[in-house]
Amino acid sequence: MGGQVPYVKLNGLLVWNYTAGQFRAISGVNVIIVDPANCTKKEWRHFGTGHSRSEAEELRDYLQRLRHGTILVGVTYDEPTAHLNASKATLSQLGVDVYGVASRAAFAFATRKGDRARTVFKKQMNEKDAKRHPPRIFATFSGALYTIYHRSSLSLHCVP
């Protein structure tokens, strides 16, 4: 897959990318739980929604179990949509509307569970657009500045 390599940075430090050794992930959705007090990664989970319906169900269940107020970011790599149907309604409740996203397209989001109105979300509907036009989103969110570089990349810098 060409284009920008997906990554997540917190305070300028790489905490996930698709080639960073222990953080290596394959097709699907990657979710990082963020501690907003010190802008660190609390947890990382990969869900292979590109190749497994059961992993899409696991993503749905995982998101539903998170406490309200949890700060999370999500980035995709390669093919996140093949089996994503089981998770779409739960993602939509977070403000992440991935309905209509085609095969090998991409999306990224930052949200506080239970505060859908403040979700920062960007998607490309197809692979061609995801490769050709990587949009950027800048927003202040829960005391932190989130910069999402599409192609499923996100940087977060905590703001005092």
Image (tube, rainbow, N blue to C red):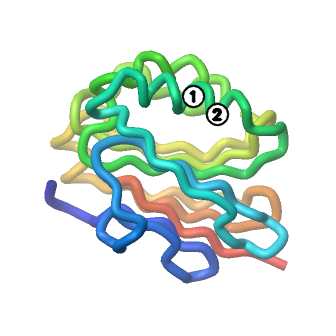
The quadrant holding residue 159 is bottom right
**Residue visible at 60% across and 23% down in the picture:** 90
**Residue visible at 26% across and 31% down in the picture:** 51
Is the residue 117 above or below the residue 71 in the image? above
Apparent side of residue 45 relative to residue 130 in the rendered image (left or right): right
User: Please, what secondary structure does the residue beneath circle 2 have?
Assistant: helix
**Residue visible at 35% across and 20% down in the picture:** 100
What residue is pinned by disc 1?
91
Residue 49 in the image: x percent, y percent? Answer: 36, 32
Residue 129 in the image: x percent, y percent? Answer: 22, 43
Q: Quadrant of the N terminus?
A: bottom left
Residue 33 in the image: x percent, y percent? Answer: 66, 55
Query: Could one spot residue 22 in this view of the protein?
Result: yes
Q: Amino acid at mark 1?
A: Leu
What residue is pinned by disc 2?
63
Q: Nearer the viewer, mark 1 or mark 2?
A: 2
**Residue visible at 79% across and 75% down in the picture:** 38
Q: Are marks 1 and 2 in contact (CB under 8 Å)?
A: yes
Mark 1 crowdedness (10 Å alpha carbons): few <14, some 14-19, many ≥20? some
Q: CA distance from mark 1 to mark 2?
A: 8 Å
User: Please, what secondary structure does the residue beneath circle 1 have?
Assistant: helix
Residues 65 and 119: in front is 65
Q: Give the mark, 1 or 2, whose residue is nearer the N terminus.
A: 2
